[in-house]
Image (cartoon, grey):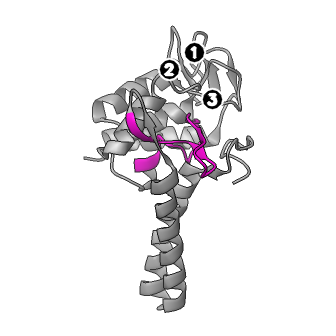
Amino acid sequence: SAFRPSDDACRFNYLIPANMFASVILEYIKEFAREIYHDDVLYEKARQLKWDIDYGIQCYGIYLHPQFGKMYAYETDGFGNYCLMDDANVPSLLSMPYLGYCTKDDVLYQHTRSFILSHHNPYFYQGTCASGIGSPHTPENYIWHIALSMQGLTGSKEEAKEMIDLILKTNNNEGLCHEGFNKDQPSEYTRPWFAWANSLFAELVYQTYFVK
């Protein structure tokens, strides 16, 4: 990958969340090839590529952190260099269970989640009004509503409700989600409305209050 989902340039070109997303999609392609198209050649190509991607993630995408233990890196070059962070945009490391790459209780995911929701993640910000993940795509200390919704979608019911309340408190009483907002002053934000953030928030509300 040359660019991240945020459109910012990659530091190292093996973007782990994007490869995880590709692995999930290839599983769908395998199903389509077998069940709908009855195409053994396409099935085998998808199966082999998915295997290669998963093998690469497990061999080169895992970092042994001195505090959090084994966890996924955001980017790697395959030569032992890692970029340890997470970005608000999806696919992200936080969104792994949402995308279907792993379960919420997966040990590596939990280690990674603990890292990215801490100050060890350079784009995690904690302020007087909110704490959450931002992005190098927006100013420093700006938290993204997308990341708060994703935190809720990949956490417990209690955490999901906390994220809903937090988003409602940080939309500047405008009834719409923004891109990023200042952790200490939510009235300072980028984009008066952001369709992606609004849609994800709607899904968070639905999953929290209408799905058992």
Q: Quick one: 106 or 125, which is closer to the camera?
A: 106
* Mark linked to residue 119: 2
Q: Nearer the viewer, mark 2 or mark 3?
A: 2
Look at label 1 and name its amino acid. Lys
Sequence-wise, the earlier of marks 2 and 1 is: 2
- Residue visible at 61% across and 10% down in the picture: 185
Visible residue check, residue 152: no
- Prevalent SS, magenta region: loop
The residue under label 1 is: 183
Visible residue check, residue 203: yes
Number of other residues with Cα within 10 Å of mark 2, as a class: few under 14, some 14 to 19, many 20 or more: few
Q: Nearer the viewer, mark 2 or mark 1?
A: 2
SS type, badge 3: loop
SS type, badge 1: loop
Q: Quick one: 211 or 19, which is closer to the camera?
A: 19
Looking at the picture, does residue 144 appear above or below residue 71?
Answer: above
- Residue visible at 49% across and 43% down in the picture: 93
- Residue visible at 63% across and 41% down in the picture: 195
Look at label 3 and name its amino acid. His
The residue under label 3 is: 178
In the drawing, does residue 139 fall left or right of residue 73?
Answer: right
Q: What stretch is highlighted in magenta?
A: 69-97
- The picture quadrant where one finds residue 196 is top right
